[in-house]
Amino acid sequence: MGQIETKKYTPKDFKSDQEIRWCAGCGDTAILNSVQKAMAQLGHNKEDYAVISGIGCSSRFPYYMNTYGFHGIHGRAGALASGVKIANPKLSVWQITGDGDAMAIGGNHFIHEIRRNIDVNLLLFNNEIYGLTKGQYSPTSKVGQVTKTSPYGNIDNPFNPGELVIGSQGKFFARGVDILLNLNIDIFKLADAHKGTSVVEILQNCVIYNDGSFAHLTGKEFREDRLITLEHGKPMVFGADKNKGLKLKGFDLEVVTIGENGNTIDDIIVHDAKNPDPSLHLKLINMQYPKYPVALGVIRDVDAPSYNDLMDESIKETVAKSKFKCLDDILYSGNTWEVK
Amino acid sequence: MDKKPIIELDEVVIKFSGDSGDGMQLTGTQFSNTSALIGNDVSTFPDYPAEIRAPQGTVGGVSGFQLNFGHKEIYTPGDYADVLVAMNPAALRANLQWVKPGGTIIVDTDSFTDKNIKKAGCEESDPLKSSKFGDFNIIEAPITSLTKESLKDSGLDNKSIVRSKNMFALGIVYWIFTRPLEYTEQFFEHKFKKKPQILEANKLVLRAGYNYANTIEAMPSYRVNPAKIQKGTYRNINGNTATAWGFLAAAEKANMPLFIGSYPITPATEILQELESRKDMGVKAFQAEDEIAGIVSAIGASFAGNMAITTTSGPGLALKTEAIGLAVIAELPLVIVNVQRGGPSTGLPTKTEQSDLLQAVVGRNGEAPVPVIAASTPSNCYNYAFEASKIALEHMTPVILLTDGFLANGTQPWNIVDSKQLPEIKPRFFKGEGEYMPYARDPETFVREWAYPGMKGAEHRIGGLEKMDLTGNVSYVPVNHEVMTNKREEKIDRIVNVIPQQKVEGDADADTLVIGWGGTYGHLLTAVQELREEGHKVALSHFNYIRPLPGNTEDIFKKYKKRLVCEINLGQFAKYLRMIYPQYEYKQFNKVQGLPFTVTELKKNILKLINE
């Protein structure tokens, strides 16, 4: 898989001939566009992409990509992607999954894939609802949310996906928003560069069953004040006037206005995505509006060996040392005897 | 050394039994290896509790290792023991019913304390003196104290000393059957290379047991001469190792990387363990987080162009069911090994059974045909693992390979089948010419072409949704679903053209045909052979290919008036045969005790039908 000049492909090269069957206005279509744009810029050969999914609206994704693709079974995208990557580590493996696929039926595979640090780009489309089954609550639905299976309000305490990633010793976590194409493309490039499980949660609007679940954050008129896009090495500032920032107060984060109460830009925390200690990353992941802006961008990006690299090294080492060069060497090893 | 005459025997059954921590499996393995190395034919059956260290001294905690060795060909570990080694009262109580009248029982008298006798639940205060023993030749040996005595100057602690008492027992049995000690001594030298003190202690105790038997002259000495067996290079092998090696052979013949995705489960775990060790041959072994991840990762690896397998036992096969359907509809090669055990649910994890046949044949949602193959001896697990792989790779389908706990742990000498003796495996890879159509098929076999990520110009999508004929695009067209369902079914049916014809052993002109499948072969063959030696006309047709059945099956069935299907379940193969060949009547003999058949009970039931 050589690095070839990045102008080789256009996003169109990654579009399959299949008609897109997501609902009009679905956030999935926007994400599809951003993935196709990112892949055109990444520099892998097209035949080296494998797009793997489970079940759910988002999991139809591979059918719309003109790459190798596998639409699996419910919850098992992580196991499928793990097998693909271990079998051929040269591939660029992209796992497409949703809040139900990854964290309800597939929760076990999700945490173990991350713990092992399999080198896969894992795009988690979080719409806080079950769409394909037509509107039941998911493990990320809000408490109190009225859905078809919570007609009197949801009492099921939700996961915060990033918190689960940290709990699974995840080394890469980023958050995007379906409609923020450029942010998503930047994130995908960093996810691709990261060796290990790169989890990208994408806040995705379901226009039919959970329309507007992120509107209070993503509306154009207040987006700048309610979201903060983190970049490694840059101060954590946000706001329409770029005058708000995050500051440490004891062990807690505090939103301050630069220029007020003696706060200067030097008081604002500089984002360190590479810090192996996940404490601050977890705080950033858990920030919720209105007390805080919701964090976007690459929150955590820490180097660690991937399972597939470790397996390759281990195989290379043992093969080099092994006295068995082919099966017959094993068959005739140890206690054997001749009958004449 | 020995002045007494040596009596020659054709065949002997020995059972070593003791607490599950007493080292009986090792003792039995040593005796069988030595016997095989001096040219006997051997069959073994380890029988142990599910608990690693079940309550000491109780019947539930007894671990046994039975072996049958002979001057003639041996197909089963034997029904009843000629010699029972009982290291404690519980072992005696658990196994007494399995000793032949007049057989020899060697007991460690040191372990027959009031406390142990009570723990074993013996009715008598002294089971050794009980009149029940009148028929047996009992060797009362103070094994523990003699072991301690011989190691008193060894410098070892008491625990290590007592732990080697199994070698004293082995020494006694080696003397009785005039076996050389050298192979076991060589084993110690290898195993305890870095522990010279333990090495010397084991050698000393083995020899002490041997000398003790010589000194007490409690019984005659026997000789079992080498068997007349086929020429070749032999080694001892158990079913699980043979299975693992069969996959290595297939991957080598297909010239493909081997991927195993599995989760440990008794009694299949050793296949995963062996293939983890074979990372030294490039095997990609992945211990997944659960059964589902085991098979799904294997499907992913198959999609990516590896030869992929997953291994499990009954409950694990249930968990893998949905994923098998995915491999069926995606038409990807995959071998699923089910080492059957007693069920349902957790059932009897360490015991053998054949009760997953219907689960394998029909246990899936939708029309999901899967070839099913069953191994029938510990060593032919190698051949059938190879065959299952060949069919999977050349026919683009998941294949279920059934073995069982009896085959998995049982051992026998194996006339090594090396790479020169195996056929090529040629998967139908896309050659890169023209447009790739994922679901275009070979007109003869209905097999599609295999293109995998990394192949330029063959990018395509597959998945669990129904797909359009030829293109593989998602399709909800009603008639297309029927077309694809029929093609998938037909593809599996046509495998009948590449599998061997079914064989019959025994009398072609008999009225009675005994029918079996899988791990019961040795017992059925022995029963049929003995009945024929006794003057009865009878034949055996034993199946390895379950789905599809061999093409000549009906021709065989119609030649016989009476058909008796013998299985370690309630009659699943009989049900299956009634479904496919309903025109014939099938009698059944079934057993579900977690144990193999005995030749005795088989003969009795076959004879009943012959005489009907």
Image: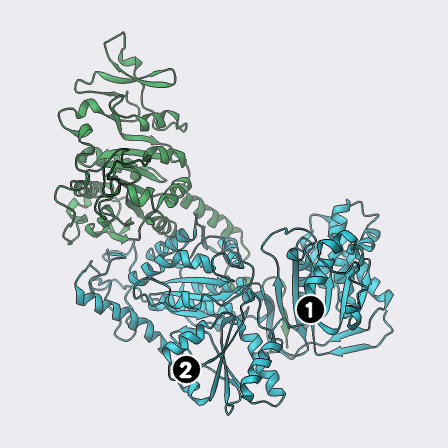
Which colour is chain A painted?
Answer: green
Amino acid type of the residue that numbered disc 2 sits on in the rendered structure: Thr
Residue toward you, A285 or A336: A285
Q: Position of residue A26 (x, y in %)?
A: 16, 42
Q: Which mark is residue B553?
A: 2
Q: CA distance from mark 1 to mark 2?
A: 39 Å
Residue drawn at point x = 33 percent, y = 42 percent = A103
Residue toward you, A29 or A184: A29
Residue toward you, B440 or B164: B164
The secondary element bearing badge 2 is classed as helix
In the image, residue B192 above or below residue B384: above
Q: Which mark is residue B97?
A: 1
Q: From where the camera sits, is residue B200 visible? A: no
Q: Is residue A55 left or right of residue B512?
A: left
Question: The N terminus of chain B is located in which quarter?
Answer: bottom right
Please give the letter of the chain rendered in cyan: B
Q: Position of residue B602 (x, y in %)?
A: 58, 78
- Mark 2 — on which chain does it sit? B
- Mark 1 — on which chain does it sit? B
Amino acid type of the residue that numbered disc 1 sits on in the rendered structure: Gln
Q: Are marks 1 and 2 on the same chain?
A: yes
In the image, residue A308 above or below residue B515: above
